[in-house]
Each structure stands twice: as C-alpha cells, then as structure tokens.
Image (tube, helix red, strand yellow):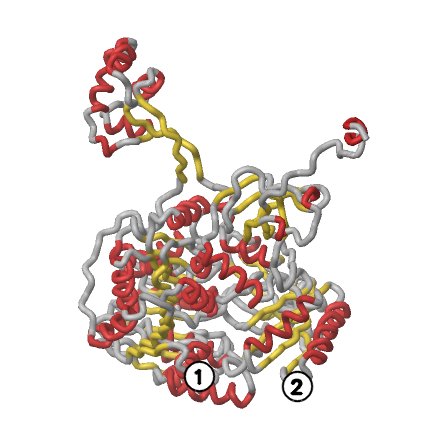
Amino acid sequence: MTDSDLKLFEPDTPPPTIGLFAKVVVERGIDTGPGLDGLTYRVVGEPPVPGERVEVPLGRGGKPAQGIVIEIGGPELLGGFDPRKVKPITARKGSPIPAPLLALARWMAEYYICPLGMVLATMVPASVKQAIGQRHIDRFRPAELAAEVRDAALATLTPKARAAWDTITALDPETFPLAAPDLALAAGLRTTRAVKQLADAGLLAAEAHTEIRAGALIGLDAVTRDTPPPLTDAQAGIVAAIEATLSGFAAHLIRGVTGSGKTEIYLHAIATNLAAGRSAIVLVPEIALTPQTADRFTRRFGDDTVAVLHSGLTQSQRHKEWSRVAAGKASVVVGARSAVFAPVARLGLIVVDEEHDSSYKQDQLPRYNARDLAVKRAHLEGCPVVLGSATPSLESWANARSGKYTLHELTERAGGGVLPNVEVVDMREERAVRITREGGSDSALHLLGPTLEEALERTLADDGQAILLLNRRGFAHYICCPDSHCGFVARCDECDASLVLHKHRDYPKGAIVRCHHCLAEQLVPQLCPTCGKKLNVFGGGTQRAQDELLRKFISMGLEDGTTLLRLDSDSMRSAADYFHALSRFGRGEARVLLGTQMIAKGLDFHNVRLVGVLDADTAINIPDFRAAERTFQLVSQVAGRAGRGNRPGRVIVQTMNPDHAAIVHAAAHDYVGFADEELAVRHRAGLPPLTRMVRIVCRDEDAQKAVDAATAIRDRLRELSPDTFGITGPAPCAVSRIAGQHRFELLVIGPRTSAVHHVLARLRAEKLVKSDAHTAVDVDPLALL
C-alpha cells in the first residue's frame, strides 16, 4: 500500500486536541438534580477560575446565557461525551464568587431544594452583572523620558503648557496617577486643556482605569469618629467570650433586653477582629434600620472601612459598594438580608442583629433564611457568628438551650435605665368608657382608646415624643354592602382576598382600592354594584390612624408630614425617605411617629416617653402556629423603644385579648416564661423547632391540576416514609388564590433535618418536586399564608 493509498483513509481534518473543560451552571431555573453538576463547555484561551462569571451558548440555537464556572478539569468532566461536540465558552465576565460562597451556594441548592443557577444568580447583584455606573477613564503621571526627548517635546508647547508642566512635576510623586480634571485642579489650572497638550506631546503617560460613578450614600457623607464608651461588666464578659472564639467557628446567642447595649458588644468584637486583619459582616433586618446602624458603625470605624449593602441603594451605589468589598477596600459590611453574600476576604465575624425577624426570610426563590445562612457561612469560613435579639426566635433559643449555641444574657439596660411600664387595656372596656363619657352610643371607629388618647395628650403637652404602632396599612380593609340580604364584599378579581381602601390626594377622587397580594388597583366603588346602596367600610390601618390623630390633636400642633410622620411601605418609597423621616424624629422636629412593624425594633431615640400599640391582635388570629410568637416579639420590641433617655417610659397596649399568653408575657418583659410555655405547646403538637417542616405549595390556573399535583407528591411521600413523617394536605392555602393561581399546600413534618431532606432528594431526583412556576418548596417556612 502506497503513501497515497494511506491518505485515503485519513480524516480530512485532524481530531481536536483534548484540552481543558469547565462545568458551568447557567443562571436559569434548570435543576440538574442532586448532583448539581452543571453543563460542560470547552475552555478556549486562558482558563477562567471557579466562581467566575462567563457567557456560554445554551440550547440548539446557541442563545447566549450567563453562568458561573464551578469546576475546571480535563476529559473526566465529559462523562464519555464526544469532545468534538462540546461548545466553547464564548466570553469571560469576571466578578468571581469566592470559594466559600460557592460552597455555600451548593449547600443552599440542596437544603432549600432550589436550582443551583438560581442560587448563584442571587449572590451577585444585577447592578454588578450589568456594570451599572462603571466607566473607563485615563489617569496621568509624568512620563519617564530621556532629557533630550523631554526638552524637545517642551519646545513645541505654549508658555502656559510649559508652566503647567513645571507645576505638575513639582507635585508629590505619591499624588499620581490622577484623572485629567483632578490633575488640573492640583496644578491650579482652570481647564484641562494644558493637561491634554502635555499628554499629546508624550510628556504625560496615560494609565487606563475603571471607576464606578455613584452618588454619596444618604447620611454617611460627613462622618466624624467617636470614642468607644466603657463597657459594663456584663458586656465585657460577652465580648471576651466572643473574642476567645475568633480563631474558629462558634455560634453565640445574645439575649439582651432592649437598650442593654448589644450593638456596643458587636462594635468591640469587630474592632478586635479588624486589628487581626480580618473582616466582618453585620446583618440588620429592615431597610429603616440600615442608615442608623450604618451611621453608628461608620462613626466608629470610618466611612472608608464600612460598606453598606441593601435594596434601598441605587443600582450604581450598590455596584460601587459591592466592588469596594470585593476589592478588599471595605472590611466591615452592614446590610440587610442579601449582605450575607458579600464577597469579603478573610471573613472573621458575622453578626445578625434582631435575629428573630421574619424579614431575614426570602419569600421568593431561593427561599433562604439569612440568619441560617450566616451560621452556615461562618461554619464554612471558620469564624464565629453572633446572633442578637431581645426576643430570640424559638429556633435559636432551643439551639442555645441544647448547647449548640453559647447563650449570653443581658438582663438590664446599659447606663442604669429601666424597662418601661407596660399597661394592657381591653378595647371592649375602652369602648364602654367612651360611650359613658359621650352619653350614648358610639358608632364612630376610634383606633385610639380613651387611655391612649389621654396619655398622648400628656406626652405632647410635656414636650415628649411618641411612637404608635399599627401593623396594618391603608385606610380600611373591609368594604361591604350594609344590606345583609345582598352580601356584596369588595374582593380582588384575581385573589381570594378583600380589597383595601387607600386614600391619597393623587388618586382619582382621592382614593383607590388595592389588593395587597397581587397589587391590582381599582377605583373605589361609590355604590354597591349589586343593589345600589352606599357601601360601608370597616377596619383601620395606618392611614385611618393618621386621620384620627390629625383630627384629635391638631390643636396640639400635630401636622401631617411635619410633626406627625407615617412610616409604612406606602409612604416610604426609598432609603432616603426612611433616613429623612427618622432624622427629623431624632432631631425632635417630629413629635409622633406612626407606622407598621418597621418602627418596632432597633430604633434608639431618647425622648420617646410613650409607645402605643393600637391593635396588638393583628397577628394573633392568623392561621399560623407562629402567631403567638410574632405577637410577643412585636409587642416586646416596640415597647422597648420607650424610656431610653433620662425620663421614664410608658407603653399602652390595646387589645381585645388581654389574657392572651403572648400579651401577658410581653407586658411583663418575660421572654423566658413565654418561650418555655410556647415550646411546651409546640412539643405537644409536634411542631418546629422540635421538628422540621417543609411546605410545598402547588399552584395552577386550573384548581384540579393543582390538587392533582399536590396529591401525587403526597402519595409518593407516603410510599417513601409511611411512618416517619406527618403529612397534612393537600388543602387550600389560607389565601387560596393569588394572581389567578389556585394554591394547595402540603405540610411535611419530620423528626430531623437529614430525614426530611433524604426523602425530598428522592422526590427531586424523580422530578416530582422542583421549585418552578407551579411548585413552591419552602424549607423551614416562617409564614403559612
């Protein structure tokens, strides 16, 4: 056989050289199952690092998709697949996720039954992916030139340009490089014309730089450093215990009464951490708390050390703060829930303030609890985590009682302050008192009873300030026909929920009705559409309370938006709104702060002498086993806002259930008594935290399809664990339809986390349980509506 004959049997092109491959998880809802392996792509050129964002072709059409590299390797990543058919990575996008966060993402995907791509997409803000506010600029420094070359270049310039050169070269070398406007300013030039001439002549060397342009953060642009106050013996003991564990993982729970100085403990522990060259993350639950908390940390550590991350920032601000953290320029991160994903290096401490708060739980995919992620991340990073609250969650309390967490308690207020006196008033008796005083029947709705009215009047007369809590928005939450034979109720067309009346001067005719679930809005019906009678409105929210306060106390100087401020999600649209409102209250310009639960915790104002809870029953009757715990926490937390200064505080709690255990214990500042009683109830009922719960909600526009899907899951669960789990349902959810989707739930309760997740992993592998548009899997749910 000749050489030419041999060539007939050779391929036209040689087979590709086997090189590097990458496992990429695309930022889509693609659930690859328990292995979470991702998709394999060919590496062309310099290989990306694990955690780096890349662009890859997806599907037959090769549509560009964003993804995260989770592994780099050779042919072993192909699993026998033909390497010639593997598509290449098309672009590298940078912004790598650190290795500990990759490990955390894998854990989240398995624990919360969520596609890994969706978890990774959550970890990096959209503003970072889209490079919002980022621009490329040139910065200049004097070029290193031979004397003859420099002199020849100078000879071509105008006298003004040569004078500018002399000024620039006289500057401190540490000043460079500078952008053209900054260089002109440093040289005393009115314009950048001379700088451009020097650069064109080759006398100034340009260096390419990237910067992110963003406005200054609200309230953090003029910060002065403060001096740490001395610690009490109790505070010092807790700080020492935390510092003793800075070299490894440990979980600390601080149960400290309101005003006991928990934040000062955090500050001292972080200072020690920074001195050791390590960083810290501080989580706070509400956006309303972030400016005040960030200001306190910035005054202690400096604005160059502290970064702020929360949803109230602009996109460019968020990008800039995240980039400062990723570059190691900020060592302390203060933020809300998503700040647990901050890409800090050398993480040495995580603090979760108000750890009990439900705001830490994400209600959309991935449905994580930032408090639990903080504990897991601390474990992965090998550092301590500190959870703090005056009313710890029963989950954390049970962990402390069992020895999983180290428990520390602060039973007295710092500085010698005393807890306020709490008075519980029965609104049924209050109504009877009002009827007696007014000499007849009382048909009007009064959200403030006589006791609270008189206390507020005395507080305002004495130049004190008051905080009033009503955890319900809007003006009225029930609109119906007065004719009992008609039965019309204003309900949402797409949800199983009544519409809420909202008043505002910008609305048509001054008011609308809104659904608080799908956010649909309608014009207020003037007459019953069924029988034509005038409609009645019942119930009250913060808007109605605002109207009542203005009507009753206008003679004492209450004015809307000046001396009376309303804080709820309707009136506060941005972080700036929160900051300005709280700043005015802190300066004493506003006398009364009325709001929902966002004003119930964390705020520290020394002239607040009265706190009023207008309706302590808003959560008691919700069909949720945590209703009593939430009621206790809300009443206890808002009561703690009173009496933080030199004057004693008074708290008045209005309720229709004065004998309810949650209210009785909250009035007595008795957390331990409530926790023991409630845990005993949970134990008898087999409910968390003594057990583990997973809630599975199946939804569909066709109710029968939703029921069938839930039934199939239930039947398979019973096959896999006939005796181990308690399975309830399928049953309609408390809100059985939202945005046109019928909703049916299963509650799965097991004795241990491992047992529950073992079964769920089986169902996930069988594609029976997955988090998508039709199925929501909520592990460790905090709300059952």
Residue type, mark 1 in image: Ala
Q: Quadrant of the N terminus?
A: top right
| Residue shown at 28% from the left, 24% from the top | 142
Q: How far apart are marks 2 and 1 (CA)?
A: 34 Å
Q: Name the residue under label 1.
A: 662
Q: Earlier in the sequence, mark 2 or mark 1?
A: 1
Query: Residue type at mark 2?
Result: Asp
Residue 723 is labelled as 2
Question: Looking at the image, is mark 2 or mark 1 nearer the viewer?
Answer: 2
Residue at 42% x, 67% y is 379
Nearest the viewer among 227 and 762 is: 762
Vertical placement of 339 versus 553: above or below?
above
Q: What element carries label 1?
A: helix
- Please determine whether, in this image, residue 33 is positioned above or below residue 177: below
Give the residue drawn at x 73%, y 75%: 711
- Mark yes or no: residue 559 visible: no
Would you say residue 165 is visible in this rendering?
A: yes
- 711 above or below 508? below
Q: Which residue is drawn at 23% across and 24% down?
A: 168
Name the residue nearer the viewer: 412 or 122: 122
